[in-house]
Image (cartoon, helix red, strand yellow):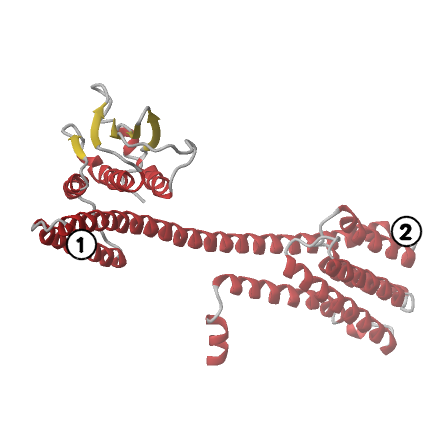
Amino acid sequence: MARWNGFWTRRTDVQRVELYTRVSLYVLVWWVGLSVVAFRPGELASPRTALLLAVAVVLTALAATLGLRVAMDQVRPRLDDPRVRRATALNVVAALVALGLAFALPQDDRGLVVTVVAGTLAWGVGAVRGRAAVALGPVVLVGGAVALFGIGASPAALVWLGVYAFFVFTLRSSLWLLAVVRELDQARQAQSRLAIAEERLRFSRDVHDVLGRHLSTIAVQAELASRLAERGDERAAATMLEVRAAAHEALREARALARGYRPVDLGTELEGARSLVRSAGIDWHEDLDDLPPRWREPVGWVVREAVTNVLRHSTATRVAVRWERRPEGAGGAGSLVVRNDGARPADPAHRGTGLVGLAERLAPTGATLDTARQDDDFVLRVDFPAETAAGRGEEPA
């Protein structure tokens, strides 16, 4: 018993649904045929009649089981698939052989064979997509009934067609349900993969922000310390202490990243940016007095990336950070503008990975990022929405 429990519990929900559907349909295929054989065993004309009927049942049930297996594997089988064509052909041949065996039976027992064929042919052919497959089962069924009983079999043929249609409906509805379950499982797996990819993207952005800024700081301060040391300036030692402090801070934030938690404080970002650009000989100006509290963290992201770009990609001598508030009644909407005077000639359509990542990170807040060159100035502008729009995405990705 424990073995069977383990066999069931080790399977996923989708595998359980598929196993349950397969077993149920396989049992139903054989139940249709065997119940007909057992319907009136004492009333059959002879043992020979019982044997022929049993052969017809087993033959059609085996073919139907194979066709059902192919249909279950593919869920939406079509005749252009070689496996489906072979299974369909086998079911039609088995049905024709069974109908041929019926000629050797007494007139009263031939209807049992047709009933078996009506039930089992539906499993092997009824699930196949396409007009030809839809018409194939009824043609074989009606043709066999007319051959066995003549034109007068029309009323009975309608009953057999009803049996065929019922089992086709049962099979197709089961396959449809199985297809829905599989698609939902695939969607769940895709959602999981997407969540993992988004988390990797978020982590890569954070690594870029943290290490980019701190490595830029270390590089600038180390170069300054080197020049001071060459001149014998006593400030070289103090500058190297700042390099060491920056390295320790980078290590601390890298560890925080590994733990998955690294809060962004605008005051800290501004202080670090101010110190960094001034140590590089760049003038720093800021005007963020009207900045709404809810935008402080996103503005911290922008300041960090903007300063990193200034140090890496420009020859700036002046950086200005300004918050431009919208007119009164705009619900706290405004724009952050970061301008530096060191724009280098570049492809206007090109945007570095840091700015692309920043734009993606800002998107959930409703903010939009834009860059432009104005003469020798490089302008980074982020438009933040009003409170009503921000409320839909206050929590960043």
Cβ atoms under marks 2 and 1 closer than 8 Å: no
Residue at the image point whose x is 91% and y is 57% from the top = 147
Q: Is residue 151 left or right of residue 235?
A: right
Residue at the image point whose x is 36% and y is 40% from the top = 360
Q: Kindly tell me whether residue 119 is visible in this rendering.
A: no
Q: Is residue 81 left or right of residue 234?
A: right
Of marks 2 and 1, the one in the foreground:
1
| Label 1: element kind | helix
Q: Nearer the viewer, residue 360 or 234?
A: 234
Q: Which residue corresponds to mark 2?
A: 152
219 above or below 43? above
Q: Position of residue 296 (x, y in %)?
A: 20, 37
Type of amino acid under label 1 = Glu
- The residue most toward the front is 231
Q: Which residue corresponds to mark 1?
A: 249
Q: Is residue 176 left or right of residue 99?
A: left
Q: Is residue 360 left or right of residue 251?
A: right
| Distance CA(mark 2)–CA(mark 1) | 95 Å
Label 2 crowd (10 A; few <14 / some 14-19 / many >=20): few
Identify the image quadrant of the C terminus: top left
| Residue 371 position by quadrant | top left
Type of amino acid under label 2 = Gly
Q: Compare marks 2 and 1 and give the one earlier in the sequence.
A: 2
Label 1 crowd (10 A; few <14 / some 14-19 / many >=20): some
Q: Position of residue 383 (x, y in %)?
A: 30, 29
